[in-house]
Image (tube, grey):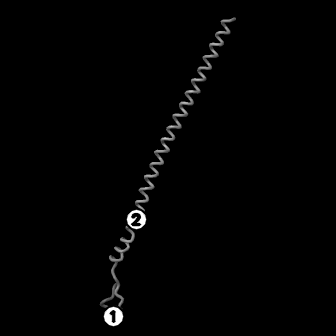
Amino acid sequence: MEEVTERRSQRQLEREREDQNMKMTRECLIIALASALIFSCKKMSSKIQRLNSASSETRECDMEATPELQLEKLHSTPQRVDSKSSEEDPVHWNV
C-alpha cells in the first residue's frame, strides 16, 4: 500500500513539475513575443519619423521651387501686344 501511495506521490510531483515547466515555457514565449513586438514598433516608429522628415524636406523644396517655376512660366509664355495700332493693322495680328 505504501508503494502505491509513493508512486502516486511521484506521479503527482512529475505532473506538477511538467505543469510548472509548461508555464515557464509559455511565459518565456510571451516575453519573447512582447520583446519582438516592441522592437518592431520601435523600428516602425523610426521609419515613420524618417518618412515624415523626407516629406517635410520635399514640401519645403516644392515651396521654394514654385515661385521660380511661376516666374519661368511667365517669361516663357508669348507676350501679347496691347497697342491699338496692332489691333488695327492686320500685319501684327497674332493668330
Q: Residue at x 36, y 77 (%)?
A: 74
Q: Amino acid at mark 1?
A: Ser
- Residue 57 locus on image (x, y percent): 40, 59
Q: Residue at x 38, y 71 (%)?
A: 67
- Residue 22 locus on image (x, y percent): 58, 25
Answer with the quarter of the image where residue 87 lies.
bottom left
* Residue located farthest toward the left when viewing the structure as drawn: 91
Answer with the quarter of the image where residue 55 lies.
bottom left
* Comparing labels 2 and 1, the label whose residue is closer to the camera: 2
Answer with the quarter of the image where residue 28 lies.
top right
**Disc 2 on helix, strand or loop?**
helix
- Residue 11 locus on image (x, y percent): 63, 14
Residue nearer the viewer, 76 or 12: 12
Asked whether, in this view, residue 11 is left or right of residue 43, the answer is right
Residues at badges 2 and 1 in contact (C-beta under 8 Å)?
A: no
**Disc 1 on helix, strand or loop?**
helix
The residue tagged 1 is 85
